[in-house]
Amino acid sequence: MKTGVLGTGIVGTTIASKLVQLGIDVKMGAREAGNSKAVAWSKSNGARASEGSFADAATFGELLFNCTSGTGSLPALEAAGAGNLGSKILVDISNPLDFSKGPPPSLSVCNTDSLAEQIQRAFPNLKVVKALNTMTAAIMVNPSLIKGDHVVFISGNDAGAKNKVKELLTSGFGWQQVLDLGDLTAARGQEMLLPFWLRVYGALQSPMFNFNIAR
Amino acid sequence: MKTGVLGTGIVGTTIASKLVQLGIDVKMGAREAGNSKAVAWSKSNGARASEGSFADAATFGELLFNCTSGTGSLPALEAAGAGNLGSKILVDISNPLDFSKGPPPSLSVCNTDSLAEQIQRAFPNLKVVKALNTMTAAIMVNPSLIKGDHVVFISGNDAGAKNKVKELLTSGFGWQQVLDLGDLTAARGQEMLLPFWLRVYGALQSPMFNFNIAR
């Protein structure tokens, strides 16, 4: 399988490196081909790793990951181009955090809408699956870092797309529990977890935690 | 200890009944004394149970619980009266759910503010402690209904008030884990959990769950 990872930050490099470890070809996309972080990542991750523009990554991947910042997501996808994005699956890991007013960040969209839904509306053919946005990057691809039961949440409008993402999360990334919250309006709740996540981070003085649903 | 419980719904009656079981005197407050639900609750809960107006309950209690609906909270507290509320501790269990636009409810305040902070600003002498708003009523007073580890979150600006509430939650209500998220701005995150809670409820088809922070 060929994948495109949009974004060169800690989330993008973490996801991209894990995919390469799983034997999956990855093209990391940035605003321009030759981005120094993307080049550094590509050079240190072997033959399956390559880099290019957002459009290059979108064209290359059969499965795409949005690992850009919340404010950068729609511009990155516009740069990728609707034609290149086509009707592919986009795993949306982004969070609409707004740091413009200083800490703590607020959300630039929430409550009656979400960034995932904004992306879905802007690119109606894309199969957007919201997932992995509620834990720190290291845990996304290595859930065994956390002891005991804990969960990754997914939502999206396309059942087939969610099944493919769920398969990758379980068989690939090692998740024991994937909870499907339904259609993409559930992304509102997933994204609204972030302000809460930040307070738990503050209380524990560590990002090495994740949510569980105890029953 | 004497307590005042504002609100006659499932949360109010659940909290009030538990307090009576713990040997604590409770006056349940409603918009008017003689509220049929408050009278019914009072009659079936023995000598420690009484009822009256919001002002009566606020005057009676040394410790107060806001168990009104989100939209009813500020009007209820205004009816209780700033003089009667004084500098007492108010455990705020409410959620600012707005059902006016049909299901699913949105939040009437969120992101850069919270209902708990609105209450605190309106009654600056009150010691508002946000707690217990993130699980169904039965679990609030009987956490052993849920297997495994799970958590009640608290926040507030007064450390002494939080300690008193924490003591009641652990020794009284039986909570094993109370996580202090810091000052009352954390209530934004606690309240923003609700849209997420509703989606988990939908996915599990049951309200009998609670959040845990796995590490």
Image (cartoon, coloured by chain):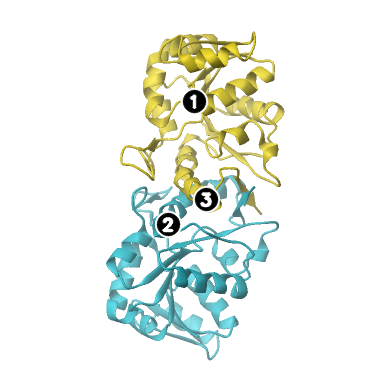
Chain colours: A yellow, B cyan
Please provide percent x and percent y for residue A35: 45, 13
Q: Which mark is residue A200?
A: 3
With respect to residue B4, does A1 lie above or below? above
Separation (CA) of disc 1 from disc 2: 30 Å
With respect to residue A90, does B111 lie above or below? below
Instruction: Please tell me which of labels 3 and 1 falls first in the chain.
Output: 1
- Marks 2/3 same chain: no
Label 3: element kind: helix
User: What amino acid is found at the position of numbered circle 2 in the picture?
Assistant: Ala
User: What amino acid is found at the position of numbered circle 1 in the picture?
Assistant: Gly
- Marks 3/1 same chain: yes
Tags 2 and 3 touching, CB below 8 Å? no
Separation (CA) of disc 3 from disc 1: 23 Å
Q: Which residue is mark 2?
A: B187
The chain identifier of the residue carrying mark 3 reads A
Q: Which residue is mark 1?
A: A9
